[in-house]
Amino acid sequence: MPNQSAEDWTTYADHVVVVTATSEQELPPTSKEVAAGEGLINRTVRLKVDKVLWSNPNAATPAPKTWDFNALGWEFTDGNQDNRRLMAMADRPRVEVGHTYIMAMEWEPAECRGEGAATGAWMGLGEGSELPYDNKVIGKGEEEGRLQDPPNAARAGVTETAPAGLEEELAGATETALVSQLNEAAASPASSSVLGAQAGCS
């Protein structure tokens, strides 16, 4: 799903929110991974929704007060789950307790979540839809499990084949600049024609 630009966010997200990670829970590896002696230990991170910055006018579900967010954890090998290597995506937050982020989120109905799903769930838009936001500064805070400042965020991940996303464009700015971009994108004819057209399963 496109998730790098203000146009992407206003097209596919239900809400854009400021969140703080307050706690996390490890997800045990599968029995198959345990038997193989290697696998993944992922996490569910509890996010407190501090503020709603923008909402799709056609969003069917209001933004929640908390969000249990699925996040990368660790990789283990040699049959020892304590022998872990931290996992992170390049130039993206891991989402760690104590840090604040801006995130784009969408509601995924139960019927879109596979057989046996009893309820819907909040989901991120994917890579590029989480921005570090410590001290109310875009690009400041946790990324790849390390602390970074806005000047580094402005350069991170920008190549000829991977143009700047919102984090790089707005590094050092506050939420006001982001909201301005979102409102401008939502008001464009192209965006207006698809707002609310994401009903059903993507």
Image (cartoon, rainbow, N blue to C red):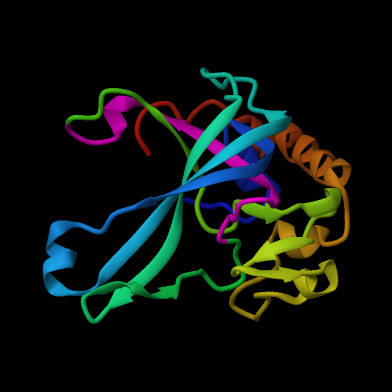
Instruction: From the top left corner, tell me how far across and down residue 15 is, in percent.
Output: 62, 32
Residue at left 84%, top 73%? Answer: 151
Q: Eyeballing the image, is 142 above or below 111?
A: below
Residue 41 horizontal side relative to residue 189, left or right: left
> Looking at the rendering, in which quadrant would you find the C terminus?
top left
How many numbered circles are shown? 0
Instruction: From the top left corner, tell me how far across and down residue 181 is, in percent.
Output: 80, 44
The picture quadrant where one finds residue 31 is bottom left
Instruction: From the top left corner, tell me how far across and down residue 164 is, in percent.
Output: 70, 67
Residue at left 65%, top 80%? Answer: 159
- The verdict on residue 103 being magenta is yes
Residue at left 60%, top 61%? Answer: 93
The picture quadrant where one finds residue 58 is top right
Question: Which stretch did the figure color magenta?
Answer: 94-115
The picture quadrant where one finds residue 64 is top right
Residue at left 84%, top 48%? Answer: 136
Residue 113 horizontal side relative to residue 124, left or right: left
Residue 163 horizontal side relative to residue 29, left or right: right
Q: Eyeballing the image, is 138 above or below 149?
A: above
117 or 187, which lies in front? 117
Q: Eyeballing the image, is 190 above or below 27?
A: above
- The verdict on residue 14 being magenta is no
196 or 33, which lies in front? 33
Instruction: From the top left corner, tell me how far across and down residue 65 is, in percent.
Output: 61, 25
7 or 103, which lies in front? 103
Q: Eyeballing the image, is 50 above or below 156?
A: above
